[in-house]
Amino acid sequence: MQNKLIFLGTGTSQGIPMIGCSCPVCKSTDPHDKRLRCSIYLEYEGLQLVVDAGPDFRQQILRENITNLDAVLLTHQHKDHTGGLDDIRAFNYLYDKNFPIYAEERVQASLKQEYAYAFAACPYPGIPQFELHTIDESPFQIQGRAIIPIRAWHHRLPILGFRFGKLAYLTDANRIEPEDIEKIKGVEIFIINTIRHTPHLSHFSLPQALEVIRQVGARENFLTHLSHQIDAHQALKALLPTNVQPAYDGLCIQF
């Protein structure tokens, strides 16, 4: 069975272009530089999954004509990764059941605050209905398909990346321990975040991301969560090693 990944969004928390910004990247006419908030869609061993559902979730799902979805996995609780979960209610209507969300306990606690109306004792009709599944650093399964969480750090916030067989996805991180890099080694495709050339408080710089890529040793590598502080798509692509390329919204890869 052929697995597939689509980059739903490859931008930072404010997206590109940013509101009110007139920098060359934000003003670029290249469609590769139009970046919605960071998210991926996967067809993995027959499952249809989304990792993170930010404020652009509805737009992304409609753009890719995604009409079936088995679960959403959350890397962490920041709004640019969870702000679109209200639109899960469309799948509630389609399936007539609660929708599975896989997240750490800390992330679930945040959802219960941000979407308090969805967890009310007497819920209002038509609200999203979530079925929360608790995950941690231990491997888990969805309908018998194995997924390996990867612990990393977003400044002081612990977050999760995920390994799906021959592919691993890690966003919103600026630190990963050697033992967690070992969990990624052996993949053929590795996706990692970078935000700019110089160090950043909570995201890998480009040199740092390239060093993690070197340690992982994957055949193909993609950069995501790209900000307007890094080069536009074509210029960035020209700077990178041959086995690394900037991802862009709508890019589809097989694995």
Image: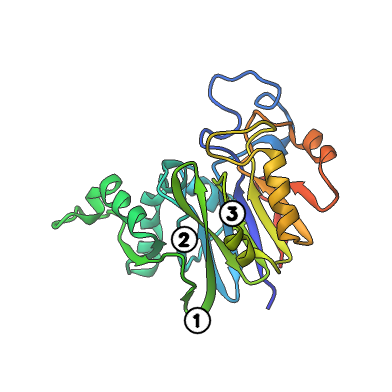
Expressed as whole percent of the image width and height from the top left, the position of residue 130 reads: 32, 61
Q: Mark 1 points at which residue?
A: 144
Give the mark nearest the N terminus, 3 or 1: 1
Q: Mark 2 points at which residue?
A: 73
- Name above or below for residue 96 compared with residue 39: below
Which of labels 3 and 2 is toward the front? 3
Secondary structure, mark 2, is: strand
Q: How far apart are marks 3 and 2 (CA)?
A: 12 Å
Q: Name the residue under label 3.
A: 170
Which of labels 3 and 1 is toward the front? 3
The residue most toward the left is 122
Q: How crowded is mark 3: few (under 14 residues within 10 Å), some or many (20 or more)?
A: many
At x 65%, y 38%, the residue is 205
Expressed as whole percent of the image width and height from the top left, the position of residue 111 reads: 32, 51
Quarter the C terminus occupies: bottom right
Expressed as whole percent of the image width and height from the top left, the position of residue 201 reads: 53, 34
Quarter the N terminus occupies: bottom right
Secondary structure, mark 1, is: loop
Residue 146 location, quadrant:
bottom right
Give the mark nearest the N terminus, 3 or 2: 2
Expressed as whole percent of the image width and height from the top left, the position of residue 92 reads: 35, 63
Residue 16 location, quadrant:
top right
The residue most toward the front is 178
Amino acid type for the residue under numbered disc 1: Gly
- Name above or below for residue 82 compared with residue 220: above
